[in-house]
Image (cartoon, rainbow, N blue to C red):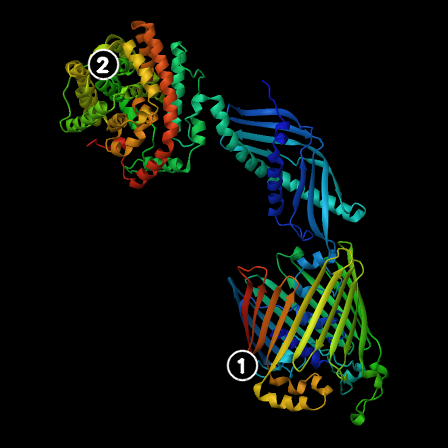
């Protein structure tokens, strides 16, 4: 392991010195000054010199991309210097009297006359030696603490060098002040400096090095989505296709994201923990967060194809479905991508159980909307693509959550099913979608019974799919997956803002409804952001997706695989763009939602 | 405005024939009174009483954001018959203003102070004890004042406060006043400060004056013009190994002067290179103008302060004044004015510095209350020129 300490970049920044000067000036004037100093202390010159300090690593407590904690032994004997300017009271009697109570003041007539003298002090030949504890975190900046008094010696040269008494006095005073500075002020200064500094570099650096970082936003929300992406990348790697443009595996930097929690998110998290500690049924909605309630349901329902997983898959599927409904051609692609997953949930279990009476209405209306849009906008392929993108994301997110194993199982199933069924399932047109949605709504509570329902619903969907296969036909016969894939790719490219399409949003809302029932209306905007879908839906899905992929790959043509990878990449890219675009809107919506506030936790909420 | 306890202390000096002004520390008292006056801040109430000729109490309450106050007691072994209540007190005595330097007098002979009774000497040295407790600041001030001899006075003042280094300080001051010259020796525990200061009055020596006969009028021609005084002070802090030196000169007209009363002082601090020249003149019946110029030969820093003091007299007195001004320019119109001091209803003090910092103070009497209203105005800050505004009300009984 090697560490490269760069001393010069500090000084290369022309603004560095001015900033440092300002900070030093502020720090020096903060603490109460001795009465002899009658004016503000100004740092007129600051030079860190060319000789870097010698650092000896004694201990490294923590080491990661974004954080570091270590203890160093520091030795410095460089040519840094510092020039201060201030005014001092040259009459010692005056300073003495200024601190003495007036009642016992000897009240000299003129012996205490003031004489302020501008004083220039140059501190040079620093000899420092001490133990430094350095803590670095991308979000929190640099914290540097001296464990002991690092100041060994320094040379103070001032305007009063010719007067030994004053010289000694100054030397003594300044050493005292410097010790204080090193141990109390300097850490604060460095921290503030690093925060400013890092605040600038952080974004650019992240954008440069990690494309996947781009969508990242400082709020918690980004967390899951980010990880989703990364996991998606991982997926790509795992599949060994390497087709995804973003190859970098991205370790789940959830901590990073959490570090950058916005105050809003923090607030929400706090209320969340409160609600868990108390009997409060209110659970704040945190975007793109996976609620344990869902997870548990998924676990429970696992034996019978988890509802959550089902929901997740469904969400993805629904997208694809919608897309398909709109675009028969697209259907195939969607099926290839997400259907696999959805089928995974549904296929094996596929027991048709009709469900949801009241829900049906909802579905219908939505369907209607979708269709309209499709009609209006020919290029609805976007939606499908979106759906596809969602699917992978969801997968990844679920990976984070750590349900992988179950999901694996499911995934396997799904994969098998998907591989088997892809085209079959794809067809399910708007009608089945509706059914599913309704089912999902039921599922949203995610309690075991609901899970059951959802499960049933899933089945229905599946069945419906085949049943309703006919309806899709009117729109268009499902083309071959490869073709669809091509179309897919094209469409997204053409459409700059796929997510903006109302259909997409609708679809998005639909999955939301699964999870959050009432939330869905409020949520819709958020739902737009793929990340959210993924988080919600993905709970169980991710691995299945992977595996399904692999399987699909085996089962279906290599071309399809490649297409999928492409798709994935594309989707990730677009997703990122979309994210960026959406962030502002989301913020606003967040606010609004918070104001509405009353939205109950999805887990405790009956969908209707 | 003079606090009641300060007023009582002054009365004690007067009763014991101690000349405050004949001290180097008060060389420039006139300029300080005219230019360095304190303007009250916030609201301050003082209620004091001389419950017996030997005992005085005073309570003060100040409200400037926080309410604080002080309780003080004073005991004097000398019966203080010259203390008046706030309704009767002469404003000249209660307010710092132009200091009319009295002619120095020949000090009493210590033998005159002796009181023998039945072959036993029973006289006591006059003593003044004073204590003041500030609340809630928890600061205690104490003063012990003793007239050791007709020419000697010991003054020990102490402050106790936990926030002070060593918990407080004590200042011991031994004053000696022979009329012709005075000297003071002081020691402060704060930094083990030792100080000596002395003042020498040139010219007329009261000790050698001719015995004054009532009908003699101007007995000694040397008294007439005025008085030139020179003094110096030296301080050395043993603990902080630092010291200070200054020398000062004053010329002041005496009551016997025929021209406008004026006071000129020049103080020099040779170490610091500080010069201070002050000039105060009584320009009319109740107007005093004063200017002070500070200059430092090392730093070239300078400061100029102008001030004035206007005494307002009762309306019905106007004709009387007019009649007098009709006549010849009478020197006695500018005498200490003890006989007509009571017709003063108020004093307006104003000063302005070269930074356009204006201080205004109006002191006067309203019925039985003494009040002072003041403000500090900074013309350089247009947005908020009034830096401080305050009123202080005093009632003494």
Q: Which secondary structure, mark 2?
A: loop
**Residue A51 position (above or below residue B11):** above
Question: Could you say where residue A401 lies in the image, as x and y percent from the top left?
Answer: 36, 22
Q: Which residue is mark 1?
A: B368
Relative side of A160 to A519, left or right: right
Q: Residues within 10 Å of mark 1 (few under 14, many from 20)?
A: some
State the CA–CA distance, disc 1 to disc 2.
Answer: 104 Å
Q: Please state which of the two labelled residues, at mark 1 or mark 2, is closer to the viewer.
A: 2
Instruction: Give percent across and percent down for residue A130.
Output: 66, 32
Q: Position of residue A281 (x, y in %)?
A: 27, 37
Q: Quadrant of residue A582?
A: top left
Pinpoint residue A400: horizontal percent, then vertical percent.
38, 21
Screen quadrant of the N terminus of chain A: top right
Callout 2: chain: A
* Residue, disc 2: A426
What residue is drawn where x is 53% and y is 82%? B367
Identified at 21% across, 31% down, the residue is A607
Measured along the vertical axis of the image, is residue B31 above or below residue A48?
below
Q: Nearer the viewer, residue B264 or A458?
A: B264
The chain that hosts pointer 1 is B
Query: Quadrant of residue A89 in the image?
Result: bottom right
């Amino acid at each position: 392991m090697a560490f490269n300490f760069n001393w010069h970049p500090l000084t290369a920044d022309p603004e560095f010195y001015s900033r440092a000067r300002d900070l030093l000036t502020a720090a020096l004037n903060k603490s109460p000054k001795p009465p002899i100093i009658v004016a503000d202390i100004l740092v007129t010159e600051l030079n860190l010199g060319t000789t870097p300090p010698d650092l000896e690593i004694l201990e490294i407590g923590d080491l990661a991309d974004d954080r570091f904690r270590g203890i160093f032994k520091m030795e410095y004997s460089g040519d840094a210097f510092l020039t201060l300017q201030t005014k001092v009271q040259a009459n010692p009697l005056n300073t003495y009297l200024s601190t003495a109570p007036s009642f016992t003041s000897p009240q000299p007539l003129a012996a205490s006359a003031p004489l302020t003298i501008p004083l220039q002090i140059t501190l040079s030949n620093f000899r420092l030696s001490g133990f430094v504890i350095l803590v670095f975190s991308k979000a929190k900046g640099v914290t540097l603490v001296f464990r002991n008094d690092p100041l060994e010696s320094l040379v103070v040269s001032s305007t009063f060098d010719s007067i030994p008494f004053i010289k000694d006095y100054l030397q003594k005073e300044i050493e005292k002040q410097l010790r204080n500075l090193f141990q109390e002020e300097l850490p604060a200064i460095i921290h503030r400096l690093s925060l400013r500094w890092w605040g600038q570099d952080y974004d650019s650096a992240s954008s440069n090095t990690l494309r996947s970082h781009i969508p990242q936003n400082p709020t918690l929300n980004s967390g899951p989505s980010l990880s989703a992406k990364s996991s998606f990348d991982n997926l790509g790697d795992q599949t060994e296709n390497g087709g995804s443009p973003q190859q970098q595996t991205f370790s789940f930097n959830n901590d990073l994201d959490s570090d950058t929690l916005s105050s809003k998110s923090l607030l929400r998290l706090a209320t969340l923990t409160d609600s868990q500690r108390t009997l409060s049924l209110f659970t704040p909605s945190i975007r793109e967060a996976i609620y344990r309630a869902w997870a548990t349901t998924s676990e429970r329902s696992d034996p019978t194809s988890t509802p959550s997983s089902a929901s997740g898959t469904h969400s993805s599927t629904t997208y694809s479905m919608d897309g398909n409904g709109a675009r028969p051609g697209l259907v195939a692609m969607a099926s290839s991508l997400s259907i696999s997953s959805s089928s995974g949930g549904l296929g094996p279990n596929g027991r048709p159980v009709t469900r949801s009476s009241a829900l049906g209405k909802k579905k219908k209306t939505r369907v209607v909307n979708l269709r309209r849009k499709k009609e209006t906008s020919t290029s609805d392929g976007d939606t499908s693509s979106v759906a596809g993108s969602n699917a992978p994301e969801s997968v990844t997110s679920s990976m984070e959550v750590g349900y992988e194993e179950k999901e694996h199982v499911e995934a396997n199933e799904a994969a098998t099913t998907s591989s088997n069924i892809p085209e079959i399932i794809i067809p399910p047109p708007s009608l089945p979608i509706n059914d599913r949605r309704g089912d999902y709504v039921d599922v949203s509570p995610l309690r075991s019974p609901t899970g059951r329902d959802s499960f049933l619903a899933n089945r229905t969907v599946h069945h419906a799919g085949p049943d309703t296969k006919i309806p899709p036909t009117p729109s268009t016969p499902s083309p071959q997956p490869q073709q669809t894939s091509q179309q897919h790719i094209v469409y997204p490219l053409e459409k700059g803002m796929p997510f903006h399409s109302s259909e997409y949003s609708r679809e998005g809302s639909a999955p939301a409804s699964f999870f959050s029932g009432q939330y869905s209306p409020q949520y819709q905007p958020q739902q737009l952001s793929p990340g959210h879908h993924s988080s919600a839906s993905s709970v169980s899905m991710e691995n299945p997706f992977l595996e399904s992929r692999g399987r699909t790959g085996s089962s279906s043509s290599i071309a399809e695989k490649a297409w999928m990878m492409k798709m994935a990449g594309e989707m990730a890219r677009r997703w990122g763009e979309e994210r960026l675009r959406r962030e502002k809107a989301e913020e606003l919506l967040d606010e609004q939602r918070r104001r509405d506030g009353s939205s109950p936790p999805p887990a405790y909420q009956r969908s209707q | 405005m003079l606090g009641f306890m300060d007023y009582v202390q002054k009365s004690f000096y007067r009763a014991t024939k101690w000349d405050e002004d004949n001290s180097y520390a008060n060389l420039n008292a006139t300029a300080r009174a005219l230019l360095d006056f304190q303007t009250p801040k916030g609201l301050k109430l003082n209620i004091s009483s001389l419950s017996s000729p030997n005992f005085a109490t005073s309570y003060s309450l100040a409200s400037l954001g926080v309410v604080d106050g002080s309780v003080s007691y004073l005991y004097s072994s000398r019966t203080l018959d010259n203390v008046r209540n706030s309704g009767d007190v002469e404003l000249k005595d209660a307010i710092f203003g132009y200091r009319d330097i009295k002619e120095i007098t020949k000090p009493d002979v210590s033998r005159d102070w002796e009181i023998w009774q039945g072959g036993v000497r029973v006289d006591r040295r006059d003593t003044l004890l004073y204590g003041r407790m500030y609340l809630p600041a928890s600061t205690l001030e104490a003063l012990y004042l003793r007239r050791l001899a007709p020419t000697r006075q010991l003054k020990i003042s102490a402050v106790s406060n936990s926030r002070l280094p060593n918990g407080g300080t004590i200042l011991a001051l031994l004053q000696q006043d022979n009329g012709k010259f005075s000297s003071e020796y002081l020691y402060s525990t704060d930094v083990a400060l030792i100080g000596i200061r002395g003042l020498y009055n040139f010219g007329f020596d009261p000790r050698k004056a001719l015995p004054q006969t009532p009908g003699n009028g101007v007995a000694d021609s040397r008294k007439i013009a005025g008085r030139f005084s020179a003094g110096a002070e030296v301080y050395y802090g043993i603990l902080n190994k630092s010291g200070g030196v200054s020398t000062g000169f004053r010329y002041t007209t005496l009551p016997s002067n025929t021209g406008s009363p004026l006071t000129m002082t020049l103080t020099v601090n040779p170490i610091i290179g500080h010069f201070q020249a002050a000039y105060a003149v009584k320009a009319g019946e109740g107007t005093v103008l004063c200017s002070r110029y500070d200059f430092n030969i090392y730093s070239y820093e300078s400061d100029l302060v102008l001030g004035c003091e206007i005494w307002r007299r009762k309306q019905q007195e106007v004709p009387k004044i007019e009649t007098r001004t009709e006549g010849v320019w009478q020197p006695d119109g500018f005498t200490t004015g003890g006989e007509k001091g009571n017709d003063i209803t108020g004093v307006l003090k104003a000063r302005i510095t070269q930074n356009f910092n204006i201080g205004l103070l109006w002191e006067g009497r309203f019925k039985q209350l003494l009040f002072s209203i003041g403000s500090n105005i900074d013309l350089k800050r247009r947005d908020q020129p009034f830096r401080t505004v305050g009123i202080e009300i005093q009632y003494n009984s």
